[in-house]
Structures are given as C-alpha cells and as structure tokens.
C-alpha cells in the first residue's frame, strides 16, 4: 500500500494532531494516519493523491510539505505517493504518536 510522509509546520501539540488527523481522514483514499507532534510529521497509507492531501490544509495555518528525506519502501508507489516514506502506520503511547485508522462504513 502506498505511503506518504509529510512535515506539517505548525503541528506542535495534541490539539493540532487531532485537527490534522481529522482533516486527513476525510481525504479520499486515506486508510491510516499517524501523526507525531515531536517532529511535526504525519505518515499516511492508502490510495490518496498528494494534491488531495495538501488541499486538506487549505485555509489553515499549517504548512504541509512532502518529506522526501526517507526513500520509498513501496516499489509500486505511483504518482500519488511519489517521495513516500515507509514505516508503521500505527503509533504508540511511548513515542508520542497518535495513530488513527479510517473507519469503514
């Protein structure tokens, strides 16, 4: 499954994490979202398009950008996941990450 990793400037507290993850859960194709306020990163997996992900931040003070520091671990990552990052989609209480899976109807 394609993955994206974003750096989200301005996401520095638990309230921000809840706001950002709620916005991203509503993006078509997003299956899981994991946000870490300590390093302002968000990891997503699913069939989402980068344009749709970035559009979720329109009208907010957050400054999202694709984190390309980590190479893609998915050989079939298409244009929607270009520059994606690998890693676990779930968070843990120890790491300060908040993992949220998209609910299926």
Image: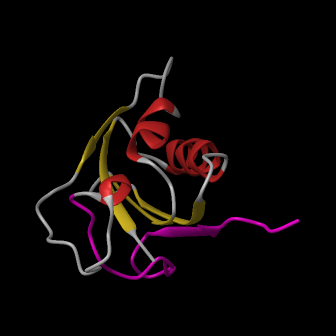
Extreme right residue here? 105
Residue 50 image point, x, y percent: 39, 45
What residue is drawn where x is 35% and y is 61%?
A: 4
Q: Is residue 93 left or right of residue 61?
A: right
Residues in magenta, as a range: 83-105
Q: Residue 49: x and y, percent?
A: 45, 48
What is the x, y in percent for residue 2? 40, 70
Residue 97 at x, y percent in the picture:
45, 69
Q: Is residue 60 magenta-colored?
A: no
**Residue sticking out furthest to the left:** 69
- Which quadrant holds residue 85? bottom left
Vertical position of residue 66 compared to residue 52: above or below: below
Q: How many marks?
A: 0
Which residue is pictured at 38% across the width and 68% down the height?
3
Q: Is residue 84 magenta?
A: yes
Q: Quick check: 61 above or below 17?
A: above
């Amino acid at each position: 499954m394609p993955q994206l990793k974003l750096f989200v400037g301005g996401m520095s507290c638990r309230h921000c994490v809840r706001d950002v993850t709620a916005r991203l859960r509503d993006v078509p194709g997003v299956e899981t979202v994991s946000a870490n306020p300590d390093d302002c990163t968000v990891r997503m997996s699913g069939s989402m398009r980068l344009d749709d992900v970035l559009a979720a931040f329109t009208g907010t003070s957050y400054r999202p950008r694709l984190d390309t520091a980590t190479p893609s671990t998915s050989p079939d990552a298409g244009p929607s996941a270009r520059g994606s990052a690998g890693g676990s989609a779930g968070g843990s209480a120890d790491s300060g990450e908040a993992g949220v899976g998209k609910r299926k109807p």
